[in-house]
Image (cartoon, rainbow, N blue to C red):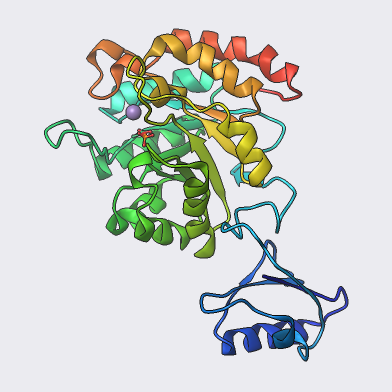
Amino acid sequence: MIIIMNSNATRDQIDEVEKRLIDLGFQTHPIFGEIKTVIGAIGDKRLLNTQDISNMPGVESLVPIMKPYKLAGKELKKEPTVVKVGDVEIGGKEVVIMAGPCAIENEETYIGTAIKVKESGAKILRGGAFKPRTSPYAFQGLEEDGLKIMAKARDITGLVLVTEVVDTRDVDLIASYADIIQIGARNMQNFKLLHEVGLTNKPILLKRGLAATIEEWLMAAEYIMAAGNSNIILCERGIRTYETATRNTIDISAIPLVKELSHLPIVVDPSHATGSWKYVNALSKGAVATGADGLIIEVHSDPSNALCDGPQSLRPSKFDQLVNELRPVAEAVGRSL
Ligand code: PEP
Ligand code: MN
């Protein structure tokens, strides 16, 4: 339920309504912006009814939100959310390219790759320092040393950093280095972790779970928003299907669907979606043509010796070619790059 306040409601009236809602056992969320002309009351015991609000000062009407994702959906907020990180905007006119290796392996190659992807037009630098791997015996990341290398790459290139958090105990550490915190596919329904990153003021890149429906994905975004953080970028990274010819199956239909259901921006990760560098170029173009607000692409200077996800990583020269080929595609759909 959303309570719409009169346009001339005073701050005292808004505070009074909020207090009474809390007394009635509802959670209140001042929605989108500092001026609380709208108060969202999210009830966990029963729905708010017109009687509850009949004698509340300054209230104009009560509007139900029918979708389970109250804050992430379009009922409450129709205009697209533009996530701003430094001078980069995700969800605006520009298609934003995020690139970098799967994992930070060492300073020299990471910084070398960072410089190259920046020269090609990437705005955001990716890299995992805490690597959740299928095998416990595989390389697990450089942890804080990796974050330090990322920070150095940011100093040198000016790129914005995105890196994954896999444990609630590391949220503060990662937030102290990262500009955008990534929630990986395997943690999309780690509700404690979603809540913890929702308490930070960092934008969140929320990857779709391996077997998550779009509704489950939006509900994961809702967890982050319910904790107070509305700066979320959704990331389609392929879902598990019966097809084994690719690592995952990219769900291109998720792009227009998410745009219809949510105001949040959506980017696509064609690298994890396919598992093979050969398809990254074509699928990146498909994603941009379908309305994606950005791409996150794995780039490695020496894919055959990468510690992680080499087969799906583009060499810097192929990445450069891709960005150039993407420009006319972006322009064809009214975007820039
Ligand atoms: C990653 O981006 O490094 C990653 C592990 O991706 P995903 O969570 O989509 O598998
Ligand atoms: Mn990877």
Tell me the quarter of the picture where residue 254 sits.
top right
Q: Position of residue 224 (x, y in %)?
A: 49, 57
Please, is residue 224 above or below residue 110 in the view? below
Corner quadrant of residue 258: top right
Task: Report which quarter residue 259 is drawn in.
Answer: top right
Residue 315 appears in view: no
Q: Nearer the viewer, residue 289 or 63?
A: 63
Q: Position of residue 292 (x, y in %)?
A: 61, 29
Which of the four quarters of the rendered structure image does ligand 2 lie in? top left
The quadrant of the image that shows the C terminus is top right
Q: Is residue 4 above or below residue 192?
A: below
In the visual, does 136 lie left or right of 239? left
Task: Work out which residue is located at the far front of the displayed protein and give it.
Answer: 242
Indicate the position of residue 148 as horizontal and vertical percent values: 32, 41
Closer to the camera in the image, 276 or 253: 253
Q: Work out which residue is located at the far left of the displayed protein and give it.
A: 137
On the question of residue 77 being in view, the answer is yes
Tell whether 3 sits left or right of 161: right
Which residue is painted at 57% across and 15% down in the image?
323
Image quadrant for the N terminus?
Answer: bottom right
Question: As displayed, is residue 227 above or below residue 88?
Answer: below
Q: How many marks?
A: 0
- Measured as percent of width and height from the top left, residue 77 is found at 71, 55
Task: Relative to 17, say whether 204 is above or below.
Answer: above
Residue at x 38% of width, y 38% of height = 211
